[in-house]
Image (spheres, coloured by chain):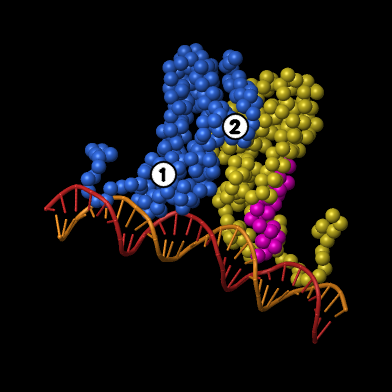
Chain colours: A blue, B yellow, C orange, D red
Amino acid sequence: MEATTQKPHRGRPKTLDRDHVLQVAMESYWSEGPTAISINEICRRAGVSKPGLYREFGSEDGLRRTALEAYRDAILAQLFEILSADIPFNDALDALIELALEDRAKLGIPAGCLLGQMRQCRNELGPQTNEAIELMCKSSLARIEDWIDRAKKNGQFPVEIPTATAALYADAQIASAIRMQAEGVAKNEISKCLQWAFRGLGLAHP
Amino acid sequence: MEATTQKPHRGRPKTLDRDHVLQVAMESYWSEGPTAISINEICRRAGVSKPGLYREFGSEDGLRRTALEAYRDAILAQLFEILSADIPFNDALDALIELALEDRAKLGIPAGCLLGQMRQCRNELGPQTNEAIELMCKSSLARIEDWIDRAKKNGQFPVEIPTATAALYADAQIASAIRMQAEGVAKNEISKCLQWAFRGLGLAHP
DNA sequence: ATCATAAAATACCAGTAGGTACGGAAAAAT
DNA sequence: ATTTTTCCGTACCTACTGGTATTTTATGAT
């Protein structure tokens, strides 16, 4: 890449706000389901014309993929940060739980997890989106594995538990908590569930 | 109800095979997603005309609701049977795990859980379907609670754990296992996850 | 001033969605 | 034989889907 955001200084200047469209698309897919919103509706909500959107993202598949990448950068990044932080395992676990259970309404962001939603209707999504989903799932899992391996080295996680399976387990538990939260289950109940879940791994968690 | 399946003995005899249509609809919704299949496609697959289908089920919402009820009677019934069986808690747990992890491909039935799928895209479904979903979720949860309460009485489950939350937890764990299975995770890995999950409740499970 | 370029948006495309009006056909009742 | 009742399916409706051809407009380069 030589000149990414460089102005091409020729032709009609573009007025389409790419980031705004992406924000609208991400929130729409996130809050109402990745297959529940049409391109037309996104254009309406973002205040852009359809050809404009197609010029920018190529296709519905391209838009969904890019929206998912925006979700990764805006939301999943927080998760990744906790996972890679150099802090005690239990502290990270607490931070993860706090992140998963934060009050979405108060923050003005949708409930649930866009990646989780897309993961569950992969067959309804295009190849680009599917590729992005797979990449992100693998990346997330790898980060969790790395997190667990580091904890093992520091004697904060039982070494006899296979890392890969434990990562799968942790991922599932967090996803489960987020899903419960999106369904309206009380925060303290979800908290209890997470405690039980991680106690099963043989951790001493207050 | 006085004459439910009684032949009305008048007018043109119906040729539409209601059960066949329901079977097709259930499997289609189940394997490809409750919002991924159109009425037209179901008609094609079932070999019935659209007005015929509408005569029988009233609307798409009605068909989805009825298909979900068929799923309850055909599939969830097995779960309910285990939950209400008069057997030791750990035996029931084993049976549940076995049911959740049975080889779907070998049985010729789709992976995943139709109720779980519908639960997660409720906002895309109609009022009838939503009502059925809520009823089934509540009913399932009540059966799990009853199961746990019986185990408590027999000293097979720690009484200090609140039944309602434990039921929520158990439900989430089973759903999680089914989801993992549908994603292609190896059976023994899911089995390990379930072991950890239920060990967290303080049960002595081999 | 003119030309090349790139982005704008209207208006359109074929296909399909959920849903129905309607005339025909098969049975029982008259 | 005719009527009544019920179900059949073709053909159609409007609305909307993802996607695009086309013309207009705004800029920099000549």
For the point 60% across and 45% down, the residue is B123
Residue B136: x and y in percent read 71, 41
Q: Which stretch did the figure color magenta? A: B51-78
For the point 77% across and 27% down, the residue is B149
Nearer to the camera, B23 or C4? C4
- Binning the other alpha carbons within 10 Å of mark 2 as few (below 14), some (14 to 19) or many (20 upward) gives many
B88 displayed left or right of B127: right
Residue B91: x and y in percent read 73, 29
Amino acid type for the residue under numbered disc 2: Gln
Residue B94: x and y in percent read 69, 30
Badge 2 is on which residue?
A181
For marks 1 and 2, give the CA distance: 27 Å
Residue C27: x and y in percent read 79, 73
Which callout, 1 or 2, points to the residue nearer the camera? 1
Amino acid type for the residue under numbered disc 1: Val
- Element marked by disc 2: helix
